[in-house]
Amino acid sequence: MTEKFSIRDYLRDLKLPFCTGCGDLTVASCFLRAVHELGYMDLNKFVFCSGIGCAAWIPSPYFKADSIHVTHGRSITVATGVKLVRPELNVVVFGGDGDMVGIGLSHLIHAARRNLDIVVVMVNNMIYGMTGGQVAPTTPIKAKTTTTPYGNVERPLDATRLVVAAGASYAARWTTFHVEQLKESMKKAVTTKGFAFVEAVSQCPTAYGRRVGLKTATEMLTWFKENSVVLQEAEKMVEKDLEGKIVVGEFVHREFPTFTETLYETIGEAKKGVKAN
Amino acid sequence: MTNIHFWQGNEACAEGAITAGCRFFAGYPITPANEIAEHLAWRLPQVSGIAIQMEDEMASLGAVIGASWAGAKAMTTTSGPGFSLMQENIGYAFMTETPCVIVDVQRVGPSTGQPTRCSQGDVMQTRWGTHGDYASIVLSPNSVQEMFDLTVRAFNLAEKFRTPVVLLADETVAHMRERIVVPSLDKVKIVNRKKPKRGDKAFFGPEDIPPMPSFGQGFNISATGSTHNEYGIRSTADPIVHRRLVERLVGKIRKNTGKIVDIEDYNPGKCEVGIVSYGCTSRAVYETVELAKKKGINVGFVRLKTLWPFPENAIQTMAQNAKILFVPEMNLGQIFYEVERVVHGTVPVVPINKIGGGEMVTPEELLKQVVRGLEKH
């Protein structure tokens, strides 16, 4: 790392679309700082895939890079095609919680299961923000949203623990309050061989915060700060005390053969004339 | 080794794909299309290609779209239920001008219907299946030979026009075995997408078929299914940008109808009875012509090898002389309505429909209808 970080070096000259106080800018900045600190002076070795939702707009078309903005929930499937054909490229998916664990959940699980070597950054704002604040699979129980005016009756999904169970090589969760940790996890995610998942719990004061009594980004970040528990501490706590808390930290970091490695090995064997079944 | 084989239609389709340059396949198991996936899983790795099974049909076409932007010729195969699930991504491929091939081996629907039985029920879905304005290119094979030849053509058209192309097969053509002559590679015309020059920035217009770069080449591609300008930058409210984009996308296919349309015909300008058919049903028409000849009835036909864009001229030509047109289909009337629209009341058009159990329209049934129809009109 020789040059000073300037976010402009990595962005197209376009006006960004995010609302005042949105956490997506923090996530974008953490990611680009991470990439810069890893020594990438441009994004030529990256392909960004994203689906539908505010977080999908982080790379598309704002990053000065190849990006493909696809159908709702299917970004990981498109990333699969890109990565398998061009394994030398860093393929990174950005998506919201609706995109990743709502409509696109099965693709997330299967990508982790396959240990497909891509990075998935899930921006979890606990709401469908782009469409105006409907309940999401990640919305806390009892929270009031436009489609749960009396309070959410469903339990939220823990996406990070889910991908750990599905076989991810790397998984971490932080909030937009934890910018340094978030950036460090993104560096690890990019350099991890295999499926890497970073969940960034993020504030949406516009479509979520103001309906649950947290009107500004500051109030939401304070809430994150006061309610986050690091994984090592959480493991010592009883379930009841963890209610309403955000468990943050690095959940897993391990190495398995990746999907592309195994696939290309198999292709090599087939080309040598190994007998098929 | 001879290049004459006794292949199944699905095998011929898979080999046609490899000949066309397909090096990426993603699919999800479904009857009656499985043999294509199985054959490609065996054959593609031998030619450095990739064949994977995805978790569903949306994922399959998603992976194909990603592979296409990564520079590979890519294909997925399915049948009715899976084809329904693919509709959103078909619209995406159309909107982003992503060349790819989707094979739909038709079975009886709606819903799960009769999975192992033949049908021609998806014709209109290939035309109007996704939401919004679009134009589709759809090919209809009627033999094992055409499962090979039209698969090659499907890739060529996809690459040439930068658009998804559907090969609309049916269970009968896909599962039957017959003689096929595989052409030597130097005899096969292969079309590859137009590549950009260094410094090019517009990959989504203004020319009808813009050049297509691949990821990782330094072009900073911005692909999006949202309305976008020629640089791929989203414009979700501007009426002009939307009109310019979608009218160009539809126009590039409409304007080239003459180059895309492909038919087989017999005596279309002189027949007294005309039959419009496609796919497996068209195989009965050949014999009907012979049976009718013995009765002194002059039957001609137009067989649609491309369903969309619709071969209007060929049908209008036949309608000029024929007293009556018949449209046999294994559905309750789909191409029939299109024929009726095209002939515009100048000649009676009679549908002959049969659904369920994979029962074909037989030459005898066709002949009976022809005789009866002639008496009535």
Image (cartoon, coloured by chain):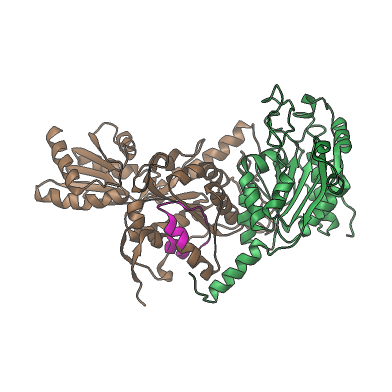
Seen in the image, is B34 located left or right of residue B326? right
Q: Say whether residue A60 is magenta.
A: no
The percent coordinates of residue A124 (x first, y second) are 75, 40
| Residue at x-position 40% and y-position 71% | B184
Q: Quadrant of residue B322?
A: top left
| Residue at x-position 52% and y-position 69% | B47
Q: Is residue A238 above or below residue A186?
A: above
Q: Say whether residue B18 is magenta.
A: yes
Does any portion of residue B252 appear in the rendered image? yes
Q: Return the residue nearer the eye: A206 or A8.
A: A206
Q: Is residue B338 above or below residue A66?
A: above
The percent coordinates of residue B113 (x first, y second) are 38, 42
As drawn, the chain in brown is B
Q: Return the residue nearer the eye: B335 or A198.
A: A198
Does any portion of residue A7 appear in the rendered image? no
The percent coordinates of residue B95 (x first, y second) are 56, 43
Q: Return the residue nearer the eye: A31 or A260.
A: A260
Seen in the image, is B16 located left or right of residue A78? left
| Residue at x-position 50% and y-position 74% | A275
What are the residue bounds of the magenta stretch?
B14-38
Considering the image in quadrants, where does the N terminus of chain A appear? bottom right
As drawn, the chain in green is A
